Image (cartoon, helix red, strand yellow):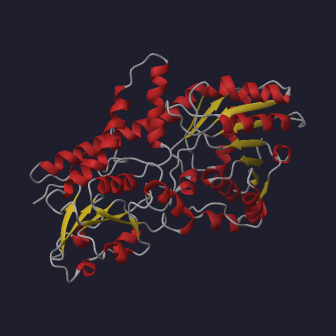
Amino acid sequence: MINKVSVIGLGKLGACMAAAIASRGFQVIGLDVMRNVVDGLNEGKAPVREPELQEMITANRDRISATMDYEAAVLASDVSFVIVPTPSEPSGAFSTTYATAAMASIGKALKKKDGYHVVCLTSTVLPGVSDNEMVPILERESGKKCGEGFGYCYSPEFIALGSVIRDFLNPDFILVGEADRQAGADLADFYERMLPNMTPIARMGCSNAELSKIAVNTYVTMKISFANTIAEICQRLPGGDVDVVTKALGHDARIGGKYLTGALGFGGPCFPRDNRAIAYLARSVGVEAPLAETTDVLNDRRAQQIISLLDGAVDASETVAVLGLSYKPSTEVVEESQGIHIARALVEAGHKVVVHDPLALDPGPDAKVRAELGDTVIYMRNLPDAVANASAVIVANSDPAFKALNASLFEGRARPVFVLDCWRYLRDTLGTSPNVRYRAVGVASE
């Protein structure tokens, strides 16, 4: 039975996983290769910024510790969750460099451990990686046989940055890929005790679980691109309104309303790369995957489709403010961000571009934004300053801070400011203002 947990890798997902598991009464020991991360967590400090994380660490500090010593982590726990980076390669495949290194260190520690220990990979990988890479490494380094001295599972999380803890503790289902039956049974029992709301658990072999993970995200990206196509149609259809259409579609149980908004394209560290990965996987086994490939093409076009709505509203020489650089609200992550893509496309079109984001322009994350946009844009940390001299404003994500964007900020202008609201977030606030020429993405212009 699993009662003590080690979490290998204390980044945005690992740190949240450790805190969430501790909040359910389990002892957790985290491991990271960064000394400042380990020391900080031992002092009760969250190593990353994520909603609820610091509060959860503070509330469960007596159940959370951290180390840089694999042997200490493995010997002090019944299961080791490995959640390390698996970066995308140019081909679309995932690199397993960090994961294989972690497995080698865990294997060495298992050699000194009596009794059965479950090793669970959580990072996203391609089908076959667990059976062909991870388990053999553990067996070689430990000198033990999988299913006897240790067990192995692949169990990824379906979470989004900005809501990691909530998603982790309230999943739609749990995916357990098992290399041996005991490991799968032990992990399922652990999840049942940690998530007492009768969460469905799907148990299967590791390769099927690895495929299921990227298949889920690929299906979601398809829904997003489909909804964006409906939004494009609605913009050109008299009386068209994507919210009206997708709300109707969402009532159909075969479709459902999640991820059917019709706004900007998908971004972040998971969706784009998982979609490309399944296309790579299909090619590697001799299967055509035009759906995934087309989804990727449509997503790449989305930024240009959005800025085309500025045609006739502002001249190429006028200033445009882009609000929202993170790929979604409540996170500073800008990886594959549509806001970044839009800002870059505007610069290429000749506009003077001002950018603002409540989190992504804080001193730490700021470096990541500047790495993307450099000196091609003007950075503003204050919302009123960001829109002060703009002839057009593009609201690129639905961060609550943008609710402060009201008509009073545009008083005294020679002509109304063009506001392009990608998420229809300010429809009631700015839709009828005389200081604003408001345009909602996915809605026919009057």
**Relative image position of residue 389 (x, y in whole percent):** 28, 75
**Relative image position of residue 204 (x, y in whole percent):** 60, 27
Vertical order, 14 against 91 (above or below): below
Task: Between residue 20 and residue 356, name the one nearer to us.
Answer: 356
The image quadrant that residue 279 belongs to is top left
Residue 104 visible somewhere in the drawing: yes
Task: Between residue 123 and residue 17, name the one nearer to us.
Answer: 123
Residue at 47%, 59% (x, y): give it.
Answer: 369
Task: Between residue 37 and residue 134, name the one nearer to us.
Answer: 37
Residue at 31%, 49% (x, y): give it.
Answer: 303
The quarter of the rendered structure image containing the C terminus is bottom left
Vertical order, 182 against 375 (above or below): above
Residue 251 visible somewhere in the drawing: no
Vertical order, 237 against 366 (above or below): above
The residue at the far top in this view is 286
**Relative image position of residue 97 (x, y in whole percent):** 66, 35
Residue at 37%, 47% (x, y): give it.
Answer: 259
Position of 446 with respect to 188 (left or right) is left
The image quadrant that residue 217 belongs to is top left
Task: Between residue 381 and residue 431, name the one nearer to us.
Answer: 381
Position of 434 with respect to 347 (left or right) is left
Residue at 71%, 26% (x, y): give it.
Answer: 180
In this rendering, the count of numbered labels is 0
The quarter of the rendered structure image containing the N terminus is top right
